[in-house]
Each structure stands twice: as C-alpha cells, then as structure tokens.
Amino acid sequence: MKEWITIFLAWRVVPITMIAFWLRYIPRHNWIATCFHIGLIVLSVAFAILFYRLCALTLQGKEKKVFQLVNFWRDRRFYYGISVFLVGVLFSLLSHGAIEGVRPTYLYTGGERKVNFYSIKEIILWAFKKVGYDVFVDFREKAVSEKPDRYWEIAENDLPKYVKGANLNNRNLTNADMYKAFLVNAHLHHAIVDGAYLIQEAKLGEANLQEANFIGAVNLTIEQLSKAKTLYQAKLDPELLGQVKKCCPHLLEKPKEETDKKDETK
C-alpha cells in the first residue's frame, strides 16, 4: 500500500510543480521562457506516466509488452502518447490567450459584458479572471521605484532627485495594471506598455520612456507624460503624440546623454 501511495504522489507532484512554475511566469509575457516551461510540463507528464506504468507492472509482476503497430489502438500506450500531446496543445493555447490577449476595459472597472466564446484570447482571460489569477503584470498601487527614507518629508518637486528608478528596460508590460503605481525615475527603454492601465495617480516623473510602446494605454494623460525624462522614439496614440508636440516637444528629441556618448566613441 505504501508503494502505491509513493507512486501516486510522485506521478502528480512533479507535473504540478512544473505547472506552478509556468503559471508564475506567465505574467512576464516572455514566449521563450514560456515555451521552455511548456516543454518541461510535457516531459514531466510523459515521464510521470512512464514511471507509473513501469512501477505498476513491476509491483503486479507483469512483463512489459513490446509496442506493435498492428491493432495499436488497443494498446494503452497509444492513448498515453495522445494524452501527452494534448497536454502540450492545452498549455500552448492557454499561453497564447494569456500572452497575446488584450485586457478589456471592463476588467479594470469591474463591469460586466458578454464574453466572445469564439475567441481563444477572451475565453482564456475570462477563465483566469474567474479563478482569481491575473495574467498581466500588476503594479497596482505599488512603489515600483525605490523611495528614499522619510520620503514624505521631501517636497514632491524634489522627490525625483532621491528616488532610485526601477529598471524595466525591454520588459513586456502589455496590459499591465499601473493604477497609482509609483514609477518615478523608472527606466522603460524599449519596454512594451501598450494597453496598460494608468490614471493620474500613476507617477512617471523623470521616467525614461525612450522607445517605449504606449499604443492603447488606458487613461494615459499628457500631464503624466510631460513629467517624463524623455519620450524619444516612444510610440503613442496620435492624439497624445500631438499634445506632446505642442506642450513639450523637447521630450521627443534625442536625449543629450545618448548624443554625448556617441560623440565620445567617434
């Protein structure tokens, strides 16, 4: 009996552990790492089934039969193989919906609307929401940049001088929830921030937004962008881009530091 309990636990613990790693990493929206995790899940399931079968045959005193193509549909191993393949397909679809899906506005506001069950992206996002797991980066009301000690005693205009900005360069922050996030001095060089949810309370003072993609960002305002350090080659919706050109066109120019570095290398 103890042997069967051990086999039962081993058969499930390893795949469940791999799934936990996959689930924990999904909000990073990194396809390379996610594919690696999917591969580990498939391998762990395959080996779990294989070892379970070998142990079961050994404990029952049965001999392992050679797999034959004739009447292969009668062999359980054929269905085990299909099961492993379907596990890979399932987690690939879940990953596609979680990474490529767009968070609808109603998910921010708590409103309700009919879900399009013909869309994989919407179904998967809806399913994750139902189980209470957010597949997008969540900076909601968090101090992403490091605040100095006793920061409340420092005047708001002087605060950027003492804040250690968060390094978010090259990060995929698609549909990230940045409600009231503290991003002063943050570095978002090459970051993808399209569809992110920001409101006035999200602080972007002196943030490096060079080449960041803000297309479709929700409630991003010119007041927030005007306090950034640079918007050089940043992607913005046409309306916001027009406002930036009117009020602070200098933010769209190449940063002086970068220009100086290029001059030094000549």
Image (spheres, grey):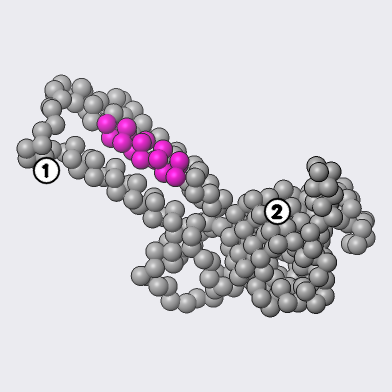
Q: Residue furthest left?
A: 70
The verdict on residue 26 being magenta is: no
Mark seen at residue 186: none
The answer to which image quadrant residue 119 occupies is: bottom left
Q: Nearer the viewer, mark 2 or mark 1?
A: 2
Q: Is residue 173 above or below residue 68?
A: below
Mark seen at residue 73: 1
Q: Residue at x 29, y 48 (%)?
A: 86
Q: Is residue 97 visible?
A: yes
Q: Is residue 76 left or right of residue 87?
A: left
Camera-nearest residue between 143 and 4 = 143
Dominant secondary structure (helix, strand or loop) of the stretch shown in magenta: helix
| First along the sequence among labels 2 and 1 | 1
Q: Residues within 10 Å of mark 2 (few under 14, many from 20)?
A: many
The residue type indicated by label 2 comes to: His
Q: Residue furthest front?
A: 266
Q: Residue at x 75, y 61 (%)?
A: 232
Mark seen at residue 189: 2
Q: Residues within 10 Å of mark 1 (few under 14, many from 20)?
A: few
Question: Considering the numbered disc 1 on the image, is that residue within a helix, a strand or a loop?
Answer: helix
Q: Position of residue 147 (x, y in %)?
A: 82, 51
Q: Is residue 203 above or below residue 46?
A: below
Q: Is residue 63 above or below residue 138?
A: above
Which residues are the magenta region?
35-50
The residue type indicated by label 1 comes to: Trp
Q: Position of residue 38 (x, y in %)?
A: 41, 44
Q: Position of residue 195 (x, y in %)?
A: 59, 66
Q: Is residue 110 visible?
A: no
Question: Considering the numbered disc 2 on the image, is that residue within a helix, a strand or a loop?
Answer: loop
User: If the image is split into quadrants, where does the N terminus sit?
Assistant: top left
Q: Position of residue 136 (x, y in %)?
A: 56, 57
Q: Residue at x 65, y 73 (%)?
A: 237
